[in-house]
Image (spheres, helix red, strand yellow):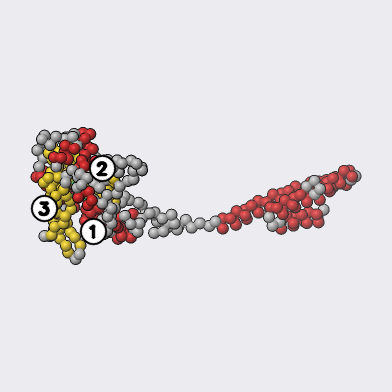
């Protein structure tokens, strides 16, 4: 009996894993296990023999069961230890840096410009980017034969074969928005029309898509003096310093008289600074709205008059943030923008790179 006991306890102590332990349990205590067979032999013993062997076998069975349970628990603990060692985690490691995204500088400038004009009582008008010939050209006093049409290098859409109506155009300015606004609401008017416009042009100062903000004020006695005040107020607010303006006579089909407006600047060390110096920089076009244009939009030029202006958002963004190449705004290569302080434009990296 002692050999039996020692043998089983030793094998249990040496079991390498739970599977080996289970094999031992079956071999000792299973139906045909060694200890079970021995217990079955009790029936063939004399009562005296059974009185000695019975309790001894029962005690052995209990002891082997306890040893199996203890070994099973020990193997479980060891397995857990092993797993914890393998999955070790350094909770003191610094977190992975992620840059927050921000809005694009052009959108940012659009918002700034809109907020400044909103302070002066302008509402914001919007309209389609794909326009009819009428709204983009004719209503703005640019008839089919007018040279300004060719100058605008417009993108045209295709018509189906046999459809002879004029093709739609990608709007070349946001002026059609204001024609639509006057048609819908009549005079008086005080709106700006910011948005995307398109021209077939691509070089250091032109991209095929760019952004404009135009302004329109129509009332009974609006004059160029009002235009001058509004623009100077705008530039001072936008550049954060008082900015002198210079009006030069010009020509646009949709305004008469027309003026190009320059702002005061200095050129030092190849960079332009606005609001100081003796140089001038052209930033926008403007004028008194042509009577033909008012009439096209259903506003009677005998009762109403007003001014309009238009400027490139990308251009005034470049001036404020000192960006020399317009293409920097639209290139997929963001190094330029990072260089000009728009670091947060980077797409947050899924690899956690910095
Ligand atoms: C209506 C009537 C007149 C808007 C105007 C300009 C002059 C102008 C350019 C500036 C730089 C376009 O982005 S740019 O290339 N714009 O010179 N725009 S007057 O005149 C209007 C607008 C709407 C109904």
Numbered tag placed on residue 138 in the rendering: none
Image coordinates for residue 95, horizontal then vertical, percent: 42, 56
Q: Mark 2 near mark 3, Cβ–Cβ under 8 Å?
A: no
Q: Nearer the viewer, mark 2 or mark 3?
A: 2
Q: SS class of the residue under badge 1?
A: loop
Residue drawn at x 14%, y 34% is 300
Question: Of label 2 and label 3, which has the lower sequence position?
Answer: 2
Residue that mark 1 sits on: 322
Question: Of label 3 and label 1, which has the lower sequence position?
Answer: 3
User: Which quarter of the figure is the C terminus placed in?
Assistant: bottom left
- In the drawing, does residue 306 fall left or right of residue 87? left
Q: SS class of the residue under badge 3?
A: strand
Question: Of label 1 and label 2, which has the lower sequence position?
Answer: 2
Q: Nearer the viewer, residue 273 or 161?
A: 161
Image coordinates for residue 274, horizontal then vertical, percent: 17, 56
Residue that mark 2 sits on: 133
Residue drawn at x 20%, y 64% is 270
Q: Total number of numbered labels?
A: 3
Q: Residues within 10 Å of mark 1 (few under 14, many from 20)?
A: few
Residue that mark 3 sits on: 248
- Image quarter of residue 330: bottom left
- Image quarter of residue 322: bottom left
Q: Nearer the viewer, residue 104 or 329?
A: 329
Image coordinates for residue 231, horizontal then vertical, percent: 15, 47
Q: Residues within 10 Å of mark 2 (few under 14, many from 20)?
A: many
Residue 95 in view of the camera: no
């Amino acid at each position: 009996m002692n050999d039996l006991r020692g043998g089983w306890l030793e094998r249990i102590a040496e079991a390498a894993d739970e599977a080996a332990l289970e094999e031992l349990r079956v071999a000792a205590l299973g139906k045909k296990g060694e200890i079970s067979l021995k217990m079955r032999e009790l029936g063939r013993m004399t009562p005296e023999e059974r009185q000695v062997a019975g309790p001894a076998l029962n005690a052995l069975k209990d002891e082997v069961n306890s040893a199996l349970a203890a070994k099973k628990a020990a193997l479980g603990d060891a397995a857990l230890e092993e797993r914890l060692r393998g999955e070790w985690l350094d909770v003191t490691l610094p977190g992975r840096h992620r840059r927050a995204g921000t809005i694009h500088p052009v959108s940012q400038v659009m918002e700034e410009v809109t907020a400044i004009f909103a302070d002066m009582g302008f509402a914001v008008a919007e309209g389609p980017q794909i326009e009819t010939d009428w709204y983009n050209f004719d209503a703005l006093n640019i008839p089919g034969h007018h040279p300004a049409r060719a100058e605008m290098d417009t993108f045209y859409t295709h018509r189906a074969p046999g459809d002879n109506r004029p093709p739609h155009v990608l709007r070349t300015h946001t002026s059609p928005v204001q024609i639509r606004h006057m048609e819908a609401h009549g005079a008086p008017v005080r709106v700006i029309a910011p948005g995307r416009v398109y021209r077939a042009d691509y070089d250091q100062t032109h991209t095929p898509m760019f952004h404009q903000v135009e302004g329109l004020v129509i009332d009974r006695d609006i004059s160029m003096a009002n235009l001058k005040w509004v623009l100077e107020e705008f530039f001072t607010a936008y550049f954060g310093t008082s900015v002198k303006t210079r009006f030069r006579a010009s020509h646009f089909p949709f305004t008469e008289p027309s003026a190009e407006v320059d702002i005061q600047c200095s050129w030092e060390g190849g960079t332009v600074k606005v609001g100081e110096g003796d140089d001038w920089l052209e930033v926008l076009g403007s004028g008194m709205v042509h009577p033909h244009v008012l009439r096209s939009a259903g506003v009677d030029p005998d009762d109403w008059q007003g001014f309009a202006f238009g400027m490139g958002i990308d251009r005034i963004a470049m001036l404020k943030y000192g960006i020399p190449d317009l293409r920097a705004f639209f290139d997929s290569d963001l190094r330029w923008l990072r260089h000009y302080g728009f670091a947060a434009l980077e797409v947050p990296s899924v690899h956690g790179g910095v």
